[in-house]
Image (cartoon, rainbow, N blue to C red):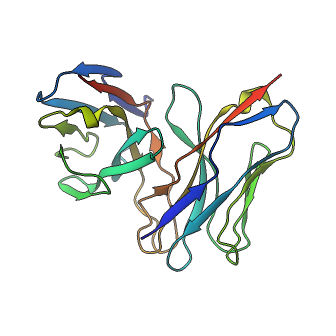
Amino acid sequence: GDSVTQMEGPVTLSEEAFLTINCTYTATGYPSLFWYVQYPGEGLQLLLKATKADDKGSNKGFEATYRKETTSFHLEKGSVQVSDSAVYFCALSAVGRYSTLTFGKGTMLLVSP
Amino acid sequence: DAGITQSPRYKITETGRQVTLMCHQTWSHSYMFWYRQDLGHGLRLIYYSAAADITDKGEVPDGYVVSRSKTENFPLTLESATRSQTSVYFCASSPTSGGAGIYNEQFFGPGTRLTVL
């Protein structure tokens, strides 16, 4: 079945450091790919998405590119802030099941001043 | 403009008791979802609903019951709570699917932290 694998955390960075959180997936066909973010004590919010190969999703300085050849959707940010501390979830929406999501286990990011 | 709300936010119960978690959305979204979040597992789909009176099982439905008599409400019932159901439960909603290849964002509630003793 469909699955999402993302790097385990926590990822600990200093403010202004470069961030990469790896995400790979297994799915049939061409799923849509997403990053959701969960701030402490809150529900998840959509951060960015990409719906076809080579698409780049971007939002709030975060970017991720849909790489079909490596089945990856790595999240990057050039300069993190303390306010980016949160749990980040990679997810996919399978072909033909566009209203349900399969999530990775989440990666906690901790940014210190 | 409440969006999507869940109640209660925190609940402690005992093994064997029935518990109902409530979810209410004000957007008239067609789709609603229940997830549980556990360390080491991320989010797992319990049940979802495409419209009133239409529900379907997700990845981990055992031990849970749902109903959807009104579009805006999607309660989740644990008929006989077990310790393994201690978790944080999230409800989400989404507009009608846009069709093949078109994904509509899911909007999440704040969660209910359930402890089963």
Residue for point 72% across, 33% down? A84
Quadrant, the C terminus of chain A: top right
Compared with residue A78, is residue B115 higher up or lower down, i.e. above or below? above
Residue A41 position in % (x across, y down): 51, 25
Quadrant, the N terminus of chain A: bottom left
Residue B43 position in % (x across, y down): 44, 46
Residue B7 position in % (x across, y down): 31, 25
Residue for point 49% across, 78% down? A28
Compared with residue B100, is residue A72 higher up or lower down, i.e. above or below? above
On the picture, is A96 further left or further right than A50? Answer: left
On the picture, is B73 further left or further right than A90? Answer: left
On the picture, is A58 further left or further right than A49? Answer: right
Residue for point 12% across, 37% down? B79
Residue A90 position in % (x across, y down): 59, 53
Q: Nearer the viewer, residue B116 or A65?
A: B116
Residue for point 81% across, 36% down? A80
Which quarter of the picture shows residue B76? Answer: top left
